[in-house]
Image: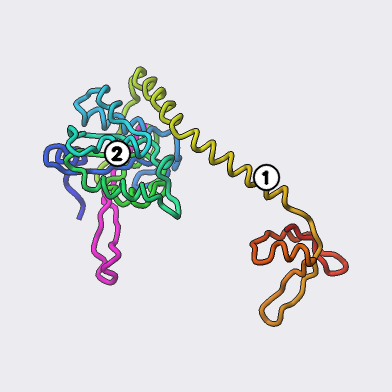
Amino acid sequence: MKDVKEFAEYLRDAITNNFLLVVLITSQTQGKRKSENLPFGLGKSTLMLWLMYYMNGKDWETVFSKLCGNPYDVILLLEPGAKRTRAAGWDAVQMTAPAEQGVPKVIRQLASYVSDTRPEMACLIMTASNINAISSPLRKLVVFEIIISERGEYEIQKIKYHKNYEQPLQDLCKLDYIEEGSFPKLPIEVIERYEEWRKKSKQKIYPTLKAACETYMKLQNEQVGDAQTITGSVIKIGNSGYAVRLPRGIGEKYHRQLVQLNVGTEQTNNEASTEA
């Protein structure tokens, strides 16, 4: 059964009735409306700022004081006993809490903590290109996904979980269409302030990313430096398959290690050029 409440009512209830809503604004996946399916540049941050503006009493100072660019900024708003935040915004979540195979422990802890922060926060609004681009623990907190189909146009879907009676430990997830609408551009002074905030926010994470990339390139260069082209015969090993017979020195050096073999053109003597 479709929800009959409007999105604004949910936001009001979160503020007045001590609820917690987690909202994600995306643009890459198409919902009910025909979409441009673009991950960037359609106005996700613009809509987030407008929602924060109206939920925080139409005060831009409060909006920018509640704007977050990383998990640490979010946790600072959740100190026990702090004045309740009506609406906070976490911009570009995929930059600091991306979907990855090994979710950092701190992100799991943050998600668990956020799930019980009704006294400190009424609504957390996040932006990301796609819901699948953010860390799984945060993804599971999202109650509403606002999909921007084209600049200035959006639709709202409520994420609902239903009991899977055949597999009781795995709930079924479905979307319930709520409404659609439009939003204007931000005032020029707000745009300029946001761009300045965004630059400072990116500067916080850039050094770590730069260092990680530098380490990665050093490792790549070391691997390239150690590589050498050798020649080995392909032999059959019983019924288990085939192997490359390497010279004794090379074999001893790389025994039980994972190596990459780049097979070259076939030779007349049935040998192949390989790179260890």
CA gap, disc 2 and disc 1: 39 Å
Question: Dot 2, crowdedness within 10 Å: few (<14), some or many (≥20)?
Answer: few
Local secondary structure at mark 1: helix
Q: Amino acid at mark 1?
A: Asn
x, y (%) of residue 91?
37, 35
Q: Which residue is mark 1?
A: 221
Question: Dot 1, crowdedness within 10 Å: few (<14), some or many (≥20)?
Answer: few
Q: Are marks 2 and 1 in contact (CB under 8 Å)?
A: no
- Quarter assignment of residue 69: top left
Q: Main secondary structure of the magenta part?
A: strand
The mark found on residue 39 in the picture is: none
Give the extent of the magenta segment.
Answer: 152-176
Q: In which quadrant will I find the C terminus?
A: bottom right
Residue 173, magenta (yes or no)? yes
Residue placed at 45% from the left, 51% from the top?
100
In this rendering, the answer to whether 257 lies above or below 116 is: below
In this rendering, the answer to whether 172 lies above or below 145 is: below
Please name whichever residue, 13 or 119, is drawn nearer the observer in this view of the structure. Answer: 119
x, y (%) of residue 119?
16, 40
Q: In which quadrant will I find the N terminus?
A: bottom left
The residue sitting at the right extreme is 268
Q: Amino acid at mark 2?
A: Ile
Q: Is residue 156 left or right of residue 194?
A: left
Residue placed at 28% from the left, 40% from the top?
180
x, y (%) of residue 123?
23, 39
Which callout, 2 or 1, points at the residue further toward the start of the chain?
A: 2
In this rendering, the answer to whether 160 lies above or below 52 is: below
Residue placed at 26% from the left, 51% from the top?
176
- Quarter assignment of residue 8: top left
Q: Inspect this view and state whether residue 265 appears.
A: no
Q: Which residue is mark 2?
A: 75
